[in-house]
Amino acid sequence: MNLYAPSPGAAARALVLGGGVVGLSTAWELARRGHPVTLADPDPGGGASFAAAGMLAPVSEFHYQEQDLLQLTLVSAAAYPGFVRDLAAAGGTDPAYRRTPTMVVGLDSADRAALADLAAAQRANGLEVEHLGTREARRREPLLSPGLTSAQVAPGDHQIDPRAMVASLRAALAALPHVRTVAATAVELLHTDPADPERVTGAELRCAELRSAERVEADETVLAAGLGASAVAGLPAGLDLRLRPVHGDILRLRVPERLRPLVQHTVRGLVHGRPVYLVPREDGTVVIGATQREDSAPGPSAGGVYELLRDAQALVPAVAELELVEVTSRARPGTPDNAPLLGRCRRADGSDVPGLVIATGFFRHGVLLSPAAARICADLVEQGPLELDPHEQSPRELGSLDLAPFRPDRFSRPVLQPARPTPARSTL
């Protein structure tokens, strides 16, 4: 009998490495299915999730030649109502999900042409986009600039506050007795099964403050550590996760009472070809963002902050009268094809490496894809069918998706070599 593999139908001991929205959602999905879960992260929700704007926008964030990713984002967006309903009930806190639609606007004639081309591509893929005249757009949002040349609405693109979502997930996990959260970083995957040296049997965790280490054994390990995933030792030899940091600057501004609501839709726009978005919050603040840079500077870019304020003011002139309360920058894990690394990876004989599920590389879609990623990871742990919550009234099911485009080993050498077994050591 293999002591490192759960028997059919048994609850698997799960170890989730990484506490961003994807890791937290996965830990909660596993825990509410009855699996004992250990979640390891030195600062849950403090990475890219802390800076995220929370746009749930599979339509307005559609990019050309990303049809496989589009199907996954649509499934996850459809899962959100049930996801937040259950989350609020479990944690007792509001994850701040809003069904307000997204308005997409263009400033000049070139922006109008670009948005018209995008709308044609969106409709060709069966996506719902409503054309608006600029007069109608300003009737719905009176503070929009009178100089706009085009406007569209994506009624199915909504939003959530990621910080409220993180708080709700942490509360839901804290309410479950079979969940343990460890403030530590994963440094190495374990391979301690003498019958199968390639099997991942947990991870060694390290707490930087205490300089201590702990070895946590698990039947299944979910590696959801964002950019840190590729730095964990003990990955299958030859596995190339091909992650890159994509930094984004995010501004938070407070709207004075006399200007509330600044906007009621999420407003996404093009300003002379440059993207910018404004996301209103229930607390009277607005989030502004859209910068992307791939450099080594970890903090906010002065140029990026200037461009965001300038372009947001071009769409909504009253932005100049808001109070700037926060400037944040975080690096998101990007991949060469902008699609996540999600699933198991192959070993030399063509089968999957047992004991390891990878969930990273979500780039700009981490918040949007959290419900789908959590269910996919939990189903892989259980080896069960991929299905949506039966309460969801959606024609799309996870089981109908082809997950091959998201395999985490798609950028690796054709054949992965066996991982070196980890010598057995006592827990420090």
Image (cartoon, rainbow, N blue to C red):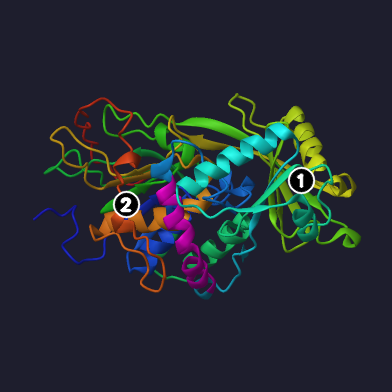
Reply above or below: 171 against 245.
Answer: below
Residue at left 26%, top 28%?
A: 237
Rendering coords of residue 305 (x, y %): 76, 34
Q: Is residue 224 above or below residue 301?
A: below
Magenta residue check for 219: no
Which one is in front in this view, the residue at disc 1 or the one at disc 2? 2
For label 2, count other residues whose C-alpha is less than 10 Å away and answer few (under 14), some (14-19) or many (20+). Answer: some
Q: Give the residue number, with chain letter if any, for mark 1.
A: 326
What amino acid is at disc 1?
Glu
Q: Tell me the amino acid under the disc marked 2.
A: Leu
Image vertical order of residue 298 relative to residue 73, above or below: above
What is the secondary structure assignment of the residue under circle 1? strand
Q: Is residue 77 magenta?
A: yes
Q: Nearer the viewer, residue 196 or 117?
A: 117
Q: Which residue is label 2 attached to?
A: 401
Q: Which span of residues is magenta-colored?
A: 70-88
